[in-house]
Image (spheres, rainbow, N blue to C red):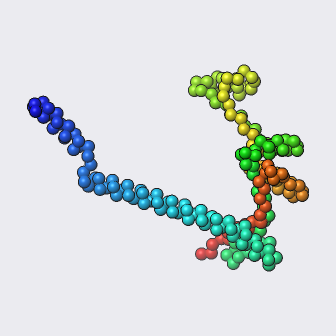
Amino acid sequence: MSKETWIFDAVEEHEKKKSLPTDGGLKIVTQIGNKLISKKKDLDQQEEKLKQIKAEIREIEENELPGAMTQVGLKKFELEDGSKISVKEEIFCSISEEKRPQALNWLEENGHSEIIKHDVKVSFAKGEYDEADRLIKVLNKEFKNIDYDEKSTVHPQTLKAFAKDRYSLGQTLPEEFFNVYEANIARVKLGKEKK
């Protein structure tokens, strides 16, 4: 082995030793890594527990409490801590993605197109500010070569209000296009905590 090779090997070995963490440093990094993994596992467990609690609350709000209140003829009541509980009939309505075209067509054909929201999205490349500005000022057929996305929807709250209005008038929505769910929901207004 030449002296030059030996020197380069020694320099390379020295650089490797410099870049490796010390036993103490490696131990700290490992402890912090394990702490992170432990916290992530804790978070996953807490999120799962939260899902379960939300499901239990929904069961109480939608079934247990409204049923019990109906049996004793109550629409609302107040607890000792000032919390107020009432039962309100709710209507939920949605349109699935696969039924959206037919549902929107039904709305248009039945005179309800005013609740349909129509979005057109146009994407310009960087540096095409002037073209974008022209499009904003004058939307015309000049921009055929620009890709765009088009989507017609009904906002969920608008659809809910629309369904509620129709059902209050004794009218329905076609179930083949709309998912309608009626439920009596117990609503809680928490009282102020006493100290």
- Rendered image quadrant of residue 129: top right
Residue at 51% over, 59% down: 44
Image x and y of residue 12, in percent: 20, 37
Residue at 31% over, 55% down: 28
Question: Could one spot residue 9 in this view of the protein?
Answer: yes
Question: Could one spot residue 114 in this view of the protein?
Answer: no
Q: Quadrant of the C terminus?
A: bottom right
Q: On screen, 132 above or below 69? A: above
Q: On screen, 128 above or below 193? A: above
Asked if residue 91 lies left or right of residue 169, the reply is left
Q: Nearest the camera: 75 or 42? A: 42
Q: On screen, 127 above or below 156? A: above
Image x and y of residue 1, in percent: 10, 33
Image x and y of residue 79, in percent: 70, 76
Residue at 34% over, 58% down: 31
- Rendered image quadrant of residue 113: top right
Image x and y of residue 103, in percent: 80, 45
Q: Nearest the camera: 102 or 14? A: 102
Residue at 47% over, 62% down: 42
Q: On screen, 89 above or below 156? A: below
Tally of marks: 0
Asked if residue 159 lies left or right of residue 125, the reply is right
Task: Spot the residue most to the top.
Answer: 142
